[in-house]
Image (cartoon, coloured by chain):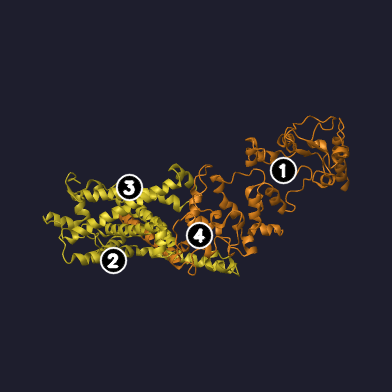
Amino acid sequence: MRLPILAALALTAAAVGARAEDPPAPATVQDCLACHGDPDLSITLGSGETQSLHVDAGGYAHSVHGSALNCTACHPGFEAQPHPTVNTASRASFRSAFRDACKTCHLDNDRKAHDGVHYQLLAAGDTRAPFCADCHTAHAVAPPSRPRAHISQMCGQCHAPIVAAYRESVHGRALTDGNPDVPACTDCHRAHDMKDPRQRAWLLETPQMCGKCHGDPKLAAKYGMSDKVLQTYLADFHGMTASLHERKSTGGTRFTALCIDCHGVHDIKRVKDPGSRVVRANLVKTCQACHAGADPTFPAAWLSHYEPSPKKAPLVYAVKVFYIAFIPFVIGGLVLQVGLNLWRFWVGR
Amino acid sequence: MSTKAETVIRFSRRTRVEHVAVMGLFLALAVTGFPQKFYPAPGTRWFVDALGGIDAVRWLHRASGVLFAALFVVHVVGAVWPTLRRKAALSLVPDAKDFRDAAATLRYQLGTAPKPPAFDRFDYRQKFEYWGLLLGGSVMVATGFLLLFPLLATAVLGGQFVPAAKVAHSNEGLMAFLVVLTWHIFNAHLSPEAFPGDTTIFTGRIDKERLRHEHALEYARFAAGAPAPALTGRPMWALVTAPVRGALLVMYLPTLGFVMVGLHLARRVRTAVRGLRSRPEPRDEDDAGEPPASAA
């Protein structure tokens, strides 16, 4: 029983070995490290910047690729001496020479990245825009979610103020504490095909994004939250507007209150936190962002994600119950009258 | 039907114009209102986009609503002013005879009376519909303005009035639409007497024969050469009591609808009981949720 499995394993191992020894014999990692293991190995680029050519041997050995890939898997042709020519005019041109290394194996993520805002910036000539190695690192590639807090650190390399605000948020603090349920940057923005978050079409998807966790009864029970926040939002004026709004990518970002307009985007606080935008003391100010001139009675027009009940909103509840009884009462009565009328006519014939 | 050409004038031009206006505005309000009420329904977003987007739909709805409110005022003033000057009678004010007529019609329909009662200028069904529109319209106009000016509404009335107005506006609108769909469309188009459509409200004229058949008391007066009945009694008092009696009529007629309410409530109770049985520890919604901030 175990024999065929062992045989299969052996065959696979042989195949991998054979691939590694295909002619022309690629340089082993050790061959490359003979030079690139030197921490001082560097070149001076045309722009005057210094570009290190050092590869941390330990970092690579412990990376996800360390036990499977030779250097030449990503740097094909570099087994030859001298190495193929690389445009060393500037850091940007040097980096771009290695941009396509990952897609040989990771084609799906590469294609997703082509739909992402970073690639669009890159294509438009913005050399600051990151590609694979900027987030995943080039050689010490680790599984991206171990630990998850690592994700926000990576984004923070460029988006420092946003990540600083996020770290102080209810989500960010929990992420730092190792909580697996809170969103890291990529849970909302996605990892490869992230869209420009200022686009209206994307903004209109944000309630569903928040609702993925905040509409989940399991998470709600775990953290003592309400799981009705999304449905109560959608049932109200703002949510209905968001549901019906045209999904076009142009247009301003202010058109109706989305989750983020009241609760904040990256700096979301616990709703009871004195610094929260939606705590009673601050709520008028939050409303006034759109409803200029709102006075302190105005926030009471919003039922704070509660469904009307005799305790929370007796008037709203009473009106609701009245119509639940009155509409069938009236329409039922009229349909009966119509029926009687027709029956009489039929009998009369 | 031999006297087909012989018609008499039933509605003034003003009444006919008001009917066309309310018809157009009612349709415009329904078309722009229901996508907002039933926003998750399939095709709603497509429909809203076809009308030019939600902002355009809202603009149309509000503009139509303001015109409806204006029409409402014009109509009420147009009914009240001549009454005060004793130039017209309130022929649509319900009276005891309407309730007797409703019962008599029911007896006729059930076969215990040989023929339906004789009606005057407006029968109880027409009065019911008129007062339903008037009272329902006043609810729609009042709640519509609350929703149009939420800042003012909360400052003057208090916060809860805005969501309450939204619930009322949404449900009252649905009810008005359903009443028109079942009652008006039947009485004006599908009923055997009116099929395929009663044109009187558009032409202002009614066949003499139909008048004799459907409004026998008015026809008798007409045949005797009497003018329209002059207002007797105190006009002010009539104007005060008319809405009350109109409301009574609107509330009274669909008594049979109680059956529906009974069934509905029974179903709800049964569901609730079943829910309690299957869930030994029902979660208290108010305590379980992370209380939204302003509930603190």
Toward the front, the furthest residue is A48
Gap between marks 1 and 3, in whole Å? 62 Å
Q: In the figure, residue B157 lies in which quadrant?
A: bottom left
Q: Colour of chain B?
A: yellow
Q: Which type of secondary structure does the marked residue at label 1 adopt?
A: helix
Q: Which type of secondary structure does the marked residue at label 3 adopt?
A: helix
Gap between marks 2 and 3, in whole Å? 28 Å
Gap between marks 1 and 4, in whole Å? 40 Å
Asked whether the residues under marks 1 and 4 belong to the same chain, the reply is: yes
Query: Disc 3 designates what residue?
Result: B24
Depicted A51 relative to depicted B70: above or below: above
Q: Position of residue B18 (x, y in %)?
A: 26, 50
Query: Disc 2 designates what residue?
Result: B244
Depicted A275 relative to depicted B40: above or below: below
Which one is closest to the eye, mark 4 or mark 2?
Answer: 4
Inspect the image, locate mark 2, and give the three-letter code of the amino acid beneath it.
Val
Gap between marks 4 and 3, in whole Å? 41 Å
Gap between marks 4 and 2, in whole Å? 44 Å
Toward the left, the furthest residue is B225
Which one is closest to the eye, mark 1 or mark 4?
Answer: 4
Asked whether the residues under marks 2 and 1 belong to the same chain, the reply is: no
Q: Which mark is residue A212?
A: none
Query: Disc 1 designates what residue?
Result: A134
Q: Is residue A2 left or right of residue A93?
A: right
| Neighbour tally class for label 1: few under 14, some 14-19, many 20 plus, Cα within 10 Å | some
Q: Residue at coordinates 80% horizontally, 30% vertically from top-left?
A: A84
The numbered mark 1 sits on a residue in which chain?
A
